[in-house]
Image (spheres, rainbow, N blue to C red):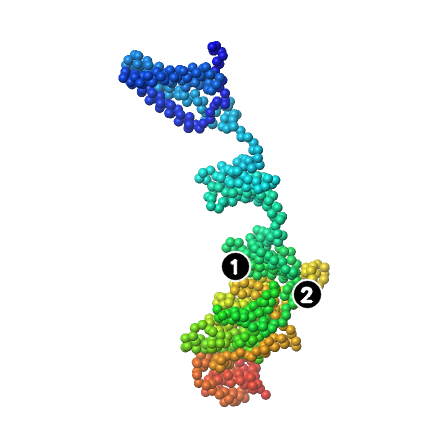
Amino acid sequence: MAITDKTPATETVADIRIVPARSIRWRARLERLVYGATALGITIAPQNEDLWPVHLGAAGIAIGAFSWLWGKWDNAAEGIGFLQASQRAVPFLSAAGLYLANMRHGADLWEYGLPAAWTILMAATTPITHSLNLHAAAQLPPAQQTLAPALTAATPAPPTTYPAYRAHQWEQARPTGSTRLVDPVQYETNRPDFWGIVIAEAGEAVPDMNPTALAGVFDLPVGTVTLQAINGSGPGRKILMARPTLDAQAQADRDPMHRLWDEKIAHPHGAAPGMLLTDYRIDDNRIALRTTAPGNQIINLNHKLLARAFDMADASLLMVETDGLGDGLISIYKTHPLMNVREATVEDLTMAEDGTIALGLRPDGRPSRMPLYDPQMGAVTDLFVGAPGAGKSVTLLTVLAAERINGIVSIVADAQDGMSLPEADGRVYHFGKGIAATAATLAASNDLGKYREKISAANGWGSFEPGQPWRIANDTLDELNRILSEDATVPRPFRKWVTGLVGDNQSTGRKLGKGIRFAAQSIHLADLGDKDRIRANAKNGTTWLGRTNSSTTQHMATDGVLPPGVYPEPIPRHFKVGSGNDIDAAFHGKEAAKGPITAGMANIIQSGGLFLGRTWFARKENKTYPGLIALMESAPIPRLTPEEDRVFQQSYAYWLAHAELLLSGDDENSIDHASAEADQYLADDEPEPSTATVKDHILDVLSDGPLPLKDVRKRLPDFAAGTVNNAMTELKNDLLVEAVGRGIYQRTN
């Protein structure tokens, strides 16, 4: 066989193996360790002739290595090259030859030196490790560095399917790191939408990626690709959904109302960001939108922003109701449903089992109900606020008619000399006219509460039960701002006294069957004394917020009367008519058309909720309201028990005199002293002495000219101050004396 026919195979770059550098070092160290152990065997074993199996093994290794090498020469065109085979055979052939030589020559000194020299040579060259042609990736020869990609791995075949293409995009993207998109699945074969599972390396989490980065991986519109956690799985895997066409189609196919809500209302820059539309209904004149706040948020519906978002020319046609927590209702009307309201009937004003009456109507046609008494919580506290012409007086008269129909004692005082509620004069149990009478009414009502408290304690009675033995008694104090506001003209001691009376009533009235109703053109709770208690008690009653100025609404919000997150639109003076508005009219230089007046319409707050309502219509004839008068006179006037009546009437006469003294600036007798005197006076069980003789003495004293009431009392030292006060009041009622100033009286002609 000619040698030229067996030319060794040429080594190519493809024969090079790329491994980590530490693997090469580990192989070399292991090889050197084997050479050291072999040298020890070569030195010792040949000296012992009894180890014939070892001798035969050494001979066998030599023969096997030579045969293997010869086979590589014979098949040089296949497998590894002959030179590589020779490198691997050298350690075996040289070790076997050295072993047999040591057996032949005995134990000469060179037989110890040769194994050591052989070990050093083999350890230095490590022929087996070098024959493997191992190279570290960072240490390739310069001529071969351009082929490094081919050395590490074969170039992958391009993806042939759409899912494989999307997985390849994920793998190639830098933000995805070492994560993998596993087996993407198309939603539909004719659409680019797909989903798949993203898996991270063991012990790692799939990173969070913003919508822009996610869309950039697949070159899809921002917002169409999402990466979400999988229920029941850890952070090492997430579900990826790409829906560039399905979401767009779903949005196009969505209900128009939900689409409008998402675009204009719930959008981050919308009228009510984040609020959810849960249901809606469309009627002939109304669109009702039911909304809720997400998670643990509080409902937040801004009336003006909502009207602007819905492109409404008349904001009053959009109405908002909330429960003060998480639910709300938005109503949009074509025409205002409260423009025409009928008159009240006895049935409307008859109390239901829950103590409420139908005060008017709500925009959706339901009755606007108001409690006169709460069977669970007791008497209620109401706040009625409205500018002139807002319908406050008509609303109060409607309430007073309801109290008379239902057997509730109405104790009324009008600080505007009775001009605000003239129809109530003579048609309720008590009607005080003027500032002094209003204060005296409140003081007498407080004394009535003290009497009830005293009797209840003496008899061991618990909670109040209407009619057992007393009726419900509600105080209605109109135009109270004439006394309590900072710009009121009353003396400071007088205002301080009345404020204290309000606070006393709030402390004891509710559990004694005595409610209270404050009414004014504007009310700040701070003016009413204990505003925290009033705010708390008002939650069991009604806050009627008619047409007012904006500052009043702001004060209601800061006082905590308005529910959080609620911004009611102020009531306009007139309903709007036609399609134009004031701006259109001003632009064209024309006068805007005005609709009917909105008197009686109010934002009503009850139990933390807000709704719009309008009081029943009241027809006005000859400056009075005959319909309301007829309702009042449809039932007898409810009255206090005889003993209660005695307490109230005596207390009222006593306090009226003191109120007039305080208004005149005479504070010689302090309120504390007067209060103690009144308590003693009212506690006296003796029959009240006749005032006939006292009247004669008063007329005699006034014969010399006008005198202040305090001077009249000084000239009559034999009579109690309360008796003199009562007698003076009776003389005034009989037109025998007249007031010529605050607390100053003279005889009439």
Secondary element at tag 2: loop
Query: Residue at (57%, 35%) from the top-left corner?
Result: 161
Can residue 499 be seen from the camera position used here?
no
Q: Dot 2 corresponds to which residue? A: 594
Query: Residue at (50%, 89%) from the top-left corner?
Result: 693
Q: Is residue 32 above or below residue 745?
A: above
Which of pointers 1 and 2 indicates the residue nearer the eye? 1
Query: Residue at (48%, 41%) from the top-left corner?
Result: 237
Q: Is residue 183 above or below residue 59?
A: below
In this rendering, position of residue 40 left or right of residue 482: left
**Residue 359: horizontal and vertical position, in percent?**
58, 70
Q: Nearer the viewer, residue 623 or 402?
A: 402
Q: Distance between the Cα atoms at labels 1 and 2?
A: 37 Å
Q: Is residue 124 above or below residue 302?
A: above
Q: Most extreme residue toward the top, as rendered?
A: 2
N-term mark: 1 or 2 = 1
What kind of residue is marked 2? Lys
Q: Which mark is residue 325?
A: 1
Q: Nearer the viewer, residue 70 or 385?
A: 70
Q: Quadrant of residue 487?
A: bottom right
What kind of residue is marked 1? Leu
